[in-house]
Amino acid sequence: MPAFCEGGWSAAASANRVGDFFGGKGGGKLSYGMATAETGLLSAQLLGQLERLELVSRKIYRGRMKGERRSPRRGQSVEFADFRNYVPGDDIRFVDWNTYARLDKLFLKLFLEEEDLHFYALIDASPSMDFGQPTKLQFAKQLAAALGFVGLARADRVRIETLGQAAEQPAPVLRGRRSLWRMLEYLEGIQPEERASLEEGVRNFCLRNSGQGIVVLISDLMDKGGYQSALRYLLAQRMDIYIIHVLSREEMDPGIQGELRLVDCEDAEVAEVTASAPLLARYRETLNAFLEGAREFCTRRGMSYVLAPNEVAIEEFVAQYLRRQGLVR
Amino acid sequence: MFPEWTNMLHGWQWLVLGLVPLAIVALYFLKLKRQPLEVPSTYLWRKSIEDLHVNSLWQRLRRSLLLWLQLLLLLLIAMALLNPSWRATRLGGNRFIFVIDNSASMNAEDMVNAAGKATRLTVARQRVEQLMDAMRTGDAAMIISFSDTANVVKEFTTDQRDLRRALDGLQPTSRRTSFSGALRLAAGLANPGRIGNPEDEDEAAADALPAKMFVFSDFKLPEVADFSLGNLDPQLEMVGQPGSVNVGIVNFSTRRHPQRSDQVQALARLENFGPQPVTVTLELFLNGQSIDVQEARIPGEDAADPGQNFAQVAFTLDDVEAGVLRLVSDYPDALPVDDQAWAVVNPPRRTRVLFVSAGNTAFEQALRTSKSQELAEVRFAAPDILGREDYRREAAAGRYDLVIYDRCQPQEMPRCNTLWIGRLPMDGRWKFGNRIDLPQIIDTERTHPLMQLLDLGNLDILESLEVQPPAGGTMLIESQGGAIFALAPREGFEDAVLGFEFQSTDEEGKDYYNTNWPRRRSFPVFVQEVIHHLANSEGKRASAAVAPGQTYELHWPEGPDQLAITAPDGTRFTVRRNPQNRYSFSQTDQLGVYQVQDGQSSHRFAVNLFDPLESDIEPVAGEAVRIGNVQVAVSSKPQGQVARIEVWKLLALLGLGVLLLEWYIYNRRVYV
């Protein structure tokens, strides 16, 4: 722990330590279709893998602090950008004296500014995320942790929020490797107990965060009010938007039978069904139509849509699914 | 046909059973308390079942399919408990013999079936088919038909299609009825004979196979004596309509007019087998052309005065040398086969008679009359001819139609009919009994053609010997001391023996007349009849009636090796001469006239039913038929034990099927 705080650790050593630190928190309750089995969010191996990655934005945004990314602002990097006429008040340190000597005119040398990237992970922590093995929420946390670590490692500005984030308890803004601990601690604290709807959560998020950058919404999109209005809020932010659609195996292939009263875990709504082969076939049709609708909605509006079955290992998901989508490289 | 229901439960049990469907329905609704299951979201489920709600009524029905199946199962169980059944004829046992009468009387069209009027044989066939329907798989049956002979139509088989095919092929005949042959055929299968020592029980030839015998007939048949049913279980079923009326021609014959040889008399005898007197119009055809019509009134059958229900009709025909006569009765009755009869007038042919005598003036004179000469070519010879070679050759070759031995005996019997006067045939079968002095004639066999026209009331005979014919012989004249004239068959011939001589020689060697018969008018008639009957001259000309199925025999010493016989339907048969110089033809199933052709000449003979037993089609309902020593009741209702065809097993099987279906549906959830 002290070594971690001091930051003088090698990648391999820190991975072990992180693993050790969170490894003991396993175990949990098991019941049909829902589980809260908790494991370490990031393994040492995954951390090593993530260190080589960086978040990619398809747009160039202005950052707030100096970072490692090109900014539309002219700044003080070593990379030359342009000349412009000197106007009084300009910092004479940037006057190009060689040009002055030759042309007898004052030109200011402009350099590209390198700034930080704003990365937002928005996690749906509604009770419906508490299903699956591992739970969808666990998957979402792991994914947020992984992407957050990538951002932290590249000195980006990382902020992880939940849809039901209370305005009086804003999520911490994280920057730098040293913030990993805080990020993980914050993620561990997220419980699947939030009752905010998708639209409400996204709207609040947009109100709180007006900046530009990458936003990754990790949700099952199972909102009875529909996901479209929520995503439109995000679109209005002109952010680089990624929708990670997490679904559990129980949702994609429900192996239920018999006369059942299905109770919605969020609003306790009841659907009485006689689970039979035709009904299950019809459910699959509906599910496919739902997934296809979400994909099309996102693709048409320039959002990246990734379907994430909760059973896919997070290493594989980051390395393959997200890489293919261009979120990381 | 509605099923019969048998209540197998008490009232309270039905009450309990009635509660079960209510319980099932109640349980069904209780069962609908579905098991709760928490899911992440009912969002997609709602969307999924929304489509199904569009046709929700049908869905609801489908969803309650299990309920309906359970109720159906219960209904089947309840019906099985009610044990519905149909009355049906079930045959006891597993081996059956169907015996069907196809004699002439079974052609009577007095039955009614689904298609309308039907003959008795058709109905009998249908009854057999009904019984076959009641046969179970593996039951074996055979079919026997009988008329005057019995035929196995189909041997024992379990193949019902074979049996039905054989049954369809069963044709009616015009034959008479004899039941015993069919019984013996059937018994042969049910009571197999034994081999070896009958006291040793191990040596039975085959297992006795008890069989149920169903007989379909009108039972107008002679009693069957001397028969034991053994393993046969007879069921006699009457096929026939009581009160059936029939008028039949029971005889039709021709003979030349005694005085005018160019005239032919056709005599018909009709009998009325109904209680009411009827008037019948008879039409006579000669070679297909109508030549005469007569009306006859026939009294009805009267139990108080039996034997009066007949009428005789005589037609006199001029200038008929030869031809075919057909007599048709127009009375509309149920049996058509006896409504017409045929007779044949053949051109006369002289027969050959040899008269061997040491002297019999009266007989010789009678044979020399022009009438006798017209009928026969008579050769007179003294007894010494019997030792001559030419006689022996001719007698052995059947050169003669009749040889009359007057007080003499040949060394061997000739191959022809014989008449012996005062001597016995030397084949050892005949015997003379006591000597009868002044025999008084007590009785004559008037039914025999030889005696038909004779009145022997004023006949005196000095002495005679009693004639004892062999078995099968017929006594023609009987006196107080026994028979003095008898007739007996011998290898297809007939021998007649007169026990008294006409001319005798006393001890002193003087001839004297032993009888005054030559002075009586009956004598020339007797000689004529001897020529007619024994020399068969009449038979050659207008052959005696041949019954259907009976063998037609023609004795023709100089005939060709083979004859061609054409049946009424045009079928041709070839008949070869047998060693007795006879031609035997037995394919006489069709009624009508048969043409006999020998190359140069031809003659005909007629086959007629002429059987009052067959023509009397009134069945003997309600009575019993005697078979051996057993009286077997005749029923007029379908035979076989009435059994219930129960369907509870089928219902139980159906219920099992429904149960399996329900199980399948429950497990596979093939419904929504």
Image (cartoon, coloured by chain):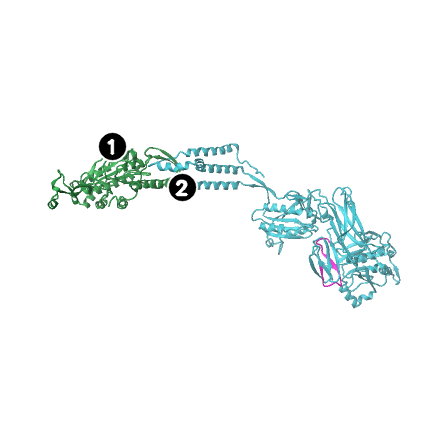
Chain colours: A green, B cyan
Foreground pick, B658 / A154: A154
Tell me the chain of label 1: A
What residue occupies the far bottom of the structure in this picture?
B389
Q: Position of residue B361 (x, y in %)?
A: 87, 61
Residue A166 disc label: 1
- Tell me residue A236's x, y (percent): 27, 36
Earlier along the polypeptide chain: callout 2 or callout 1? 1
Magenta stretch, overall SS:
loop
Under mark 2, the amino acid is Ala
Q: Is residue A280 above or below residue B539?
A: above
The percent position of residue B235, horizontal first and vertical second, equals: 64, 45
Residue A253 quadrant: top left
| Whether residue B71 can be seen here | yes
Q: Is residue B548 above or below residue A225?
A: below
Residue in the picture at 58% in, 39% down: B1
Location of the C terminus of chain B by quadrant is: top left
As helix, strand or loop, the secondary structure at mark 2 comes to helix
Q: Give residue A282's position: percent from left, percent from top.
A: 39, 40
Q: How many marks?
A: 2
Toward the front, the furthest residue is: A104
Which stretch did the figure color magenta? B546-564
Q: Which mark is residue A277?
A: 2
Drawn side of residue B533 relative to residue B335, left or right: right
In the image, taking residue B627 as reference, residue A263 lies left or right, namely: left
Asked if badge 2 and badge 1 are on a common chain, one would say yes
Q: Secondary structure at mark 1?
A: loop
- The amino acid pointed to by label 1 is Ala
| Distance of label 2 from label 1 (alpha carbons) | 44 Å
Q: Are marks 2 and 1 in contact (CB under 8 Å)?
A: no
Other residues around mark 2 within 10 Å, as few (<14) / some (14–19) / many (≥20):
some
B557 in magenta? yes
